Image (spheres, rainbow, N blue to C red):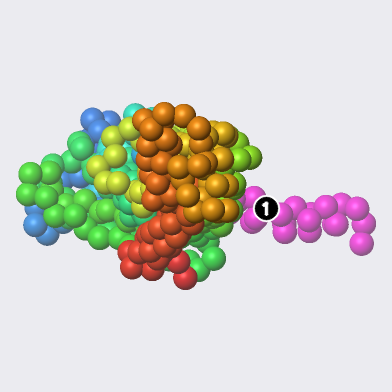
Amino acid sequence: MNVYSFSVIVLFLIYPIRSQQELDLNDYSRLRRDILKRSAVVDKVPPDVSNSKNVSSFVISVLILDVLNIDEVEQIMNCILVLEIYWKDSTLQWNPIDFNGLNSTNIDSSSIWLPRLVVSLGSKDSLYVNLAEVLTLHYDGNLTSSSHYYLSFRCHVDFTKYPFDLQICGFGLYPMNWRPTQMRIKDEFLENDGIFDLTGNWQLVNHSSSVYKNVKYGDFPRVDLTVKRRSVYYVIVLIFPMVLTSLLVPLVFLIPAETGEKMSYLVAILTSTAIFITLISEVMPRGLTTIPYLAILLFEVLVEGLCAILASLLVLHRYVQEQKVKKSPATTDSVQDETKSGQVSRAVEGDSDSLASVRSSEKETRSRVTSRVLDKIFLACFGFGHVIFLLGLFCLSDWLQNIK
């Protein structure tokens, strides 16, 4: 076989392939030109749903990839999602037979009419959703837009059970340039186990989608996410230190009054409590509508510390009185003489008024409760009251209900 014959055979084999590619390219170009010349595309007319025979469908599919975080102060949830939107425009249909079997094509979103989606409860940066730049158009008039989005929307955070709280946040998508009487909306939520991955402070508990019924604005799909806070960090940093600090308050009554360390001990405890207040205030918003259980615990520590200071002042005052009585020489002689002879008249020399005053002071001192006895009484009262409070807060309330 010579070179000429071989070249003829190669050309004979390649020509049909090139011809088919050129034919497909011509059909594709011819289809695009046919679509772009239609009046519905040129004038960007919305789908005509006035004819009951051609009712357009509007489907929104949401796939949550990750919930990044929740800003508790601003009360905004941030998440990454894939948003797929399907709608039908009967004016964009064609017969695949006329275009060599082509049943779909890509078209620029700027060339045709697009639904303008509004995010209900969306933040200022995510109030509108811009569709993909390139759409997929099928022969039956169905259009598909698929793209990734960083979505932020408002989320009312309930701090009652903080940090063992569950939060339900949701958002809706509403086509504002499509009258509700001209559309039929279907909602679809793609569920995929393992695709939901909350790597931050929150753990996904449940997710659901529904069609929100509204007479004024029409129906629109809504997505709800139920997330639970990961509480291990807060237990280590907040709960355990606060409970331990509150348990240390009654122990101030084990410190002897003569050491002079009672007040400095309580001041150190109140200083650590002030640090907890700073940590909590950075997380919670200013417009709280309910009182968190953690704030109740913090308030109890403050009140207990204040009461312990007052009780310690009473103990120290009693201790100072005891020391004054012990340092009095008249009282010392009186006590010694009473022990030896039992006769008070021979104990102290002086006039009768001074002797009566000493006796009166001694009897009053003996009748009073000593500082050590007061320490024991306050230790029992504060310890018992605090244990009852902790049992009621952790066991009887629903604070720990969401821990599993």
- Name of the residue lying farthest toward the right: 2
Q: Which residues are magenta?
A: 1-26
Q: Say which element carries label 1.
A: helix
Q: Quadrant of the N terminus?
A: bottom right
Q: Is residue 109 visible?
A: no
Q: Residue 208 at what x, y percent from top left? A: 33, 62
Camera-side residue of 122 and 331: 331
Q: Is residue 58 visible?
A: yes
Q: Residue 28 at what x, y percent from top left? A: 47, 46
Q: Quadrant of residue 310?
A: top left
Camera-side residue of 22 and 29: 29
> As displayed, is residue 335 above or below residue 97?
above
Camera-side residue of 125 and 68: 68
> As displayed, is residue 106 above or below residue 230?
above
**Residue of label 1:** 15
Seen at 64% across and 56% down, the residue is 16
Camera-side residue of 113 and 126: 126
Query: Is 364 one of the magenta-colored residues?
Result: no
Q: Amino acid at mark 1?
A: Tyr
Seen at 25% across and 54% down, the residue is 221
Q: Residue 173 at what x, y percent from top left? A: 28, 46
Q: Is 53 positioned to the left or the right of 104 in the image?
A: left
Q: Quadrant of residue 329?
A: top right
